[in-house]
Amino acid sequence: MAFDFKKEYKELYRAKSKAEIVDVPAINYIAVSGKGNPNDVNGDYQKAVAILYAVAYTIKNSHKTDHKIEGFIEHIVPPLEGFWWQDNVAGIDLSNKDSYNWIAVIRLPDFVSQKDFDWAVETASKKKKIDCSLARFITIAEGLCVQIKHVGSYDNEAESIAKMEKLLKDKGYETDFNGIRFHHEIYLSNPKRVAEEKRKTIIRHPIKKTN
């Protein structure tokens, strides 16, 4: 049976509807950075997502090619994720998507090296006939965070964020947004297939102890 990140790392991908505090380890990602509204059909974000999946599926199917990755395990491509922020804004302003900065990511299996990643980018570019050179191999160590499973429109995330903030206040923590720690979303539902009111998204925020 193919390795499923969502099942093997339940604490990271099976968030509850009740806010909880988690310690997130360092994780390797395929990443594409950009700016602008993610809902723009012809925007950079949609192009970034296409690049991420092209590279991710090239790695997933690498065992069918001449490129053999040491330690390869058949696996399900992990869900799409995104780190979001805006200049001169503490946290995230959900009403102003045009001002978003973002890093769109898909988790990499631990067995993928930089050499394997470079092969996948080059191979995906040729096979899919899209330029995947914007893809980067990055490692993000989020550390201590608060998270919650949000069900519904992305525009209504403030309701779930309020629950997270209440938990932090009760437990003696506060959010810790800075130049390397951002609003983080993990998309458990395909927005093209799941009705808006039923979409499931994990929202994760970096935190620290209140002084």
Image (spheres, grey):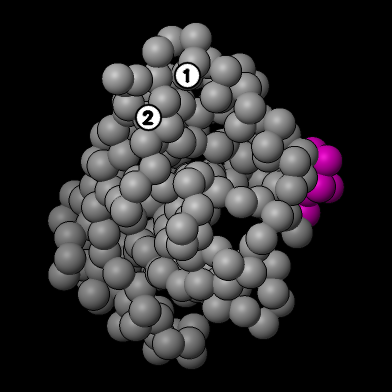
Location of the N terminus (image quadrant)? top left
Identified at 37% across, 79% down, the residue is 134
Q: Is residue 64 visible?
A: no
Q: In terms of depth relative to the viewer, which is nearer, 34 or 86?
A: 86
Q: Amino acid at mark 2?
A: Ile
- The image's mark for residue 207 is 2
Q: Camera-side residue: 115 or 204?
A: 204
**SS for tag 2?**
strand
Q: Residue furthest top?
A: 170
In the picture shown, does residue 126 fall above or below 52?
below
Image height check: is 118 above or below 181?
Answer: below
Res 127 quadrant in image = bottom left
Residue 187, horizontal then vertical, whole percent:
59, 46
Residue 113 image offset from top left, x and y in percent: 17, 60
Q: Which residues are magenta?
A: 193-198
Q: Which mark is on residue 168? A: 1
Percent of width and height locating residue 140? 28, 48
Quarter of the figure with the C terminus: top left
Please tell me how crowded label 1 is: few (under 14), some (14-19), or many (20+) other residues with Cα within 10 Å: many
Picture residue at 50% right of the left edge, 53% below the top: 89
Give the spatial CA distance, label 2 vs label 1.
Answer: 8 Å
Please tell me which residue is depicted at 68% across the width and 39% down the height of the picture.
157
Q: Is residue 84 magenta?
A: no
Q: Nearer the viewer, residue 42 or 59?
A: 42
Q: Image point 34% across, 47% down: which residue?
A: 178
How busy is the neighbourhood of tag 2: few (under 14 within 10 Å), some, or many (20 plus)? Answer: many
Q: Are marks 2 and 1 in contact (CB under 8 Å)?
A: yes
Picture quarter containing residue 64?
bottom left
Q: Where is residue 145 shown, x and y percent of the image?
A: 39, 29
**As shown in the figure, which amino acid type bears the numbered disc 1?**
Leu
Q: Secondary structure at mark 1?
A: helix
Check residue 107 in the rendering and tell me which mark sits there, or answer none.
Answer: none
